[in-house]
Image: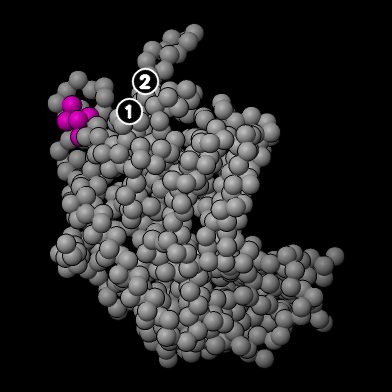
Amino acid sequence: MSTIADIQNEIVAEFEILGEDRESTIFYIMELGGNLEPFPEDFRKEEYIIQGCQSKVWLVAEEKEGKVHYRADSNTDITKGLISLLIRVLNHRSPKEILEANLDFIPRIGMGNILGSQRSNGLAAMMNQMKRYALAFQTKQNA
Amino acid sequence: MAIQVNSIRSEFPILHQEVNGNPLIYFDNAATTQKPKMVLDAIQNYYEVDNSNIHRGAHTLADRATRQFEETRESVRAFIGAKESAEIIFTRGTTESINLVAKTFGSTFIQKGDEIIISTLEHHSNIVPWQMLCEQNGAILRVIPITDAGELVWEDFEKLLNPKTKLVSVVHASNALGTINPVKRMIDAAHAVGAKVLLDGAQSTSHLDVDVQALDCDFLTFSAHKLYGPTGLGVLYGKRELLEAMPPFLGGGEMIREVTFEKTTYNTIPFKFEAGTPSIAEVIAFKPALDFITSTGKANIHRHEHDLLQYAVELLQDVKGVIPVGTAAEKIAVFSFNIQSMHPFDVGQLLDAKGHCCTYWTPLHPALDAEIRN
């Protein structure tokens, strides 16, 4: 399995192909949302909404054999694309790996410039929530 | 007289730039307008030449600054047709103006069980201060519903009015849908049951002729930054007898006549409501903004905006997937729309990539989700 660093390098390379064109980059991010696995309707509840995002983002995580499995959805296509990138990097990893991950692909692809500050804050909120789940699972594993 | 678009455009330095490789197209005027050069020059000139505190310094600079500051008050008076400039209070913005009324008029004249009427078209700044007041003193907040076209339901408004109604606080023109409310009729109906009326003019003052004496509204609130003026400056107009009967808002310098440790006597209006050093540069620079509107002519501005709106509506009605939102018969030049099966956040981000600045918006009407406003 590729490492977190490998996958981040892949993503950076994909965005480099798109170059400086913001419109195509945004369309690309919107398309990436299509890669998300279907979100179970049972979890489309207030308690799974990530606070701090302008769009609605639902995120659930389960632990299977020591690895974290994330599922997410959003009411906007750009946000779906963004969380699909985070899931691509962090899915099926151990809580320890997730907590130690340095998600440098976000600044490397210049996400702040593409998205503006409000959406970048939302992206940070998604990342924090994913790490919070990992921390909860790690605490449980060590208990 | 037709608007000279190119000469007006040349007055706005900010418009001469590219955003994301495309010429800037700025459609977010309902959020804030750009500033013509004379406003920017006035700010710079104030700090370079006249900077000093007003109303108390006994020197030339203070005298110049005070004179210019008070000249703006007189310009604002003329702009909204108030009887006297003492009825013009400078605040930090529409939001503060409404909060001032809620805290002072509200706490004095609205009691437990009294009713306040607002509408579904209100901005948060004309909802939350009243909710806070109701929470504090047990008054009741009533809300006028709207139709699918975005117009107030007149019959429901009439039903809500009763002798317990102490205040109707309503927006003149909606920021989200552009609807112009029939405010003269509303004011007359409210006065008939003994209620006072606050008109939120944040969106209307830049587009429509607003004459407070002709309308007979009791309060009018608006922000300089939506009238080509600086940010951080708002206006509260109030009828003299009301402003005099209201207690002060904030305590501090400027609003007092005499202070001893035993007792303080308050200054006369408007100063009673202007505690502390005000936004002097902003007030002074607001005058050229008002002059810009007056010299361009509100009727000309209105006609031009109306033509632009018609043009947009005509072109966009043939574009597949564009769903207009807010189709009131009387509206200012706001075009709100959705695009089928796309979230407005996504549409806004894509438009921005093309150099268009517009707003995505979430009103409180349950029939409407968010929308894009141009």
Residue at disc 2, secondary structure: loop
Q: Nearer the viewer, residue B94 or B20?
A: B94
Say which mark, if any, is on residue B86: 1
**Mark 1: amino acid:** Ala
- Tell which residue pokes out farthest to the right in this image: A143
The residue tagged 2 is B268
Q: Nearer the viewer, residue B153 or B349?
A: B153
Circle 1 packing at 10 Å, graded few (<14), some (14-19), many (20+), is some
Say which mark, if any, is on residue A135: none
Q: Residue at left 20%, top 27%?
A: B62
Circle 2 packing at 10 Å, graded few (<14), some (14-19), many (20+), is some
Does the residue at mark 2 contact the one at mark 1 (Cβ under 8 Å)? Answer: yes
Does residue A25 appear in the picture of this structure?
A: no
**Mark 2: amino acid:** Thr
Residue at disc 1, secondary structure: helix
Instruction: Tell whether position B103 is magenta.
Output: no
Vertical placement of residue B38 versus A118, above or below:
above
Q: Earlier in the sequence, mark 2 or mark 1?
A: 1
| Image location of residue B286, percent across then percent down | 26, 44
Q: Main secondary structure of the magenta part?
A: helix
Instruction: Tell whether position B67 is magenta.
Output: yes
Which residues make up the magenta segment? B63-69
**Where is residue A16, by image quadrant?**
bottom left
| Image location of residue B162, percent across then percent down | 63, 38
Please state if B34 lies on the left or on the right of B121 as rendered: left
Does residue B24 appear in the picture of this structure?
A: yes
| Image location of residue B165, percent across then percent down | 60, 37
Q: Nearer the viewer, residue B144 or A117?
A: B144
* Picture quarter with the C terminus of chain B: bottom left
